[in-house]
Image (spheres, rainbow, N blue to C red):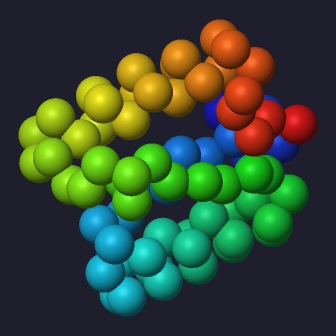
């Protein structure tokens, strides 16, 4: 997949200064600030192994309702 094919990024860093900064830098380098980025983890915390699947489900629900920050 090419960067221009991506419409939205659900950030997944752990809420630490180092992790969030590294993820923001990588996202910026990859997409150049042209893709909406948000994070759900701040709303429910880090649920360890369940975090990725929970974020995936919430993103799908948001997109199906038309409320995701897609272009």
Which residue, as the protein is rendered here, is positioned at the far front?
Answer: 43
- Residue at image location 57% in from the left, 73% down from the top: 24
Residue 61, placed above or below residue 41:
above
Question: Could you tell me how many numbered marks the image carries?
Answer: 0
Horizontal relation, residue 44 to residue 31: left or right? left
Residue 49, position in %: x, y?
11, 40
Residue 8, placed above or below residue 14:
above
Which residue, as the protein is rendered here, is positioned at the far top?
Answer: 64
Q: Nearer the viewer, residue 22 or 54?
A: 54
Figure quadrant of the C terminus: top right
Residue 69, position in %: x, y?
75, 40
Residue 67, position in %: x, y?
72, 28
Residue 38 can be seen, yes or no: yes
Q: Nearer the viewer, residue 31 or 65?
A: 65
Horizontal relation, residue 45 to residue 4: left or right? left
Which residue, as the protein is rendered here, is positioned at the far bottom?
Answer: 17
- Residue at image location 68% in from the left, 14% down from the top: 65
Horizontal relation, residue 52 to residue 40: left or right? left
Figure quadrant of the N terminus: top right
Residue 6 can be seen, yes or no: no
Residue 46, placed above or below residue 7:
below
- Residue at image location 59% in from the left, 78% down from the top: 25
Horizontal relation, residue 17 to residue 29: left or right? left
Q: Quadrant of residue 52?
A: top left
Residue 66, placed above or below residue 13:
above
- Residue at image location 34% in from the left, 72% down from the top: 15
Q: Nearer the viewer, residue 3 or 18?
A: 18
Q: Quadrant of residue 18?
A: bottom left
């Amino acid at each position: 997949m090419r960067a221009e094919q991506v419409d939205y990024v659900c950030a997944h860093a752990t809420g630490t200064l180092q992790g969030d900064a590294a993820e923001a830098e990588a996202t910026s380098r990859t997409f150049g600030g042209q893709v909406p980025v948000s994070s759900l983890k701040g709303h429910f915390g880090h649920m360890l192994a369940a975090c990725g699947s929970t974020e995936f489900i919430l993103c799908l629900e948001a997109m199906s309702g038309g409320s995701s920050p897609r272009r």
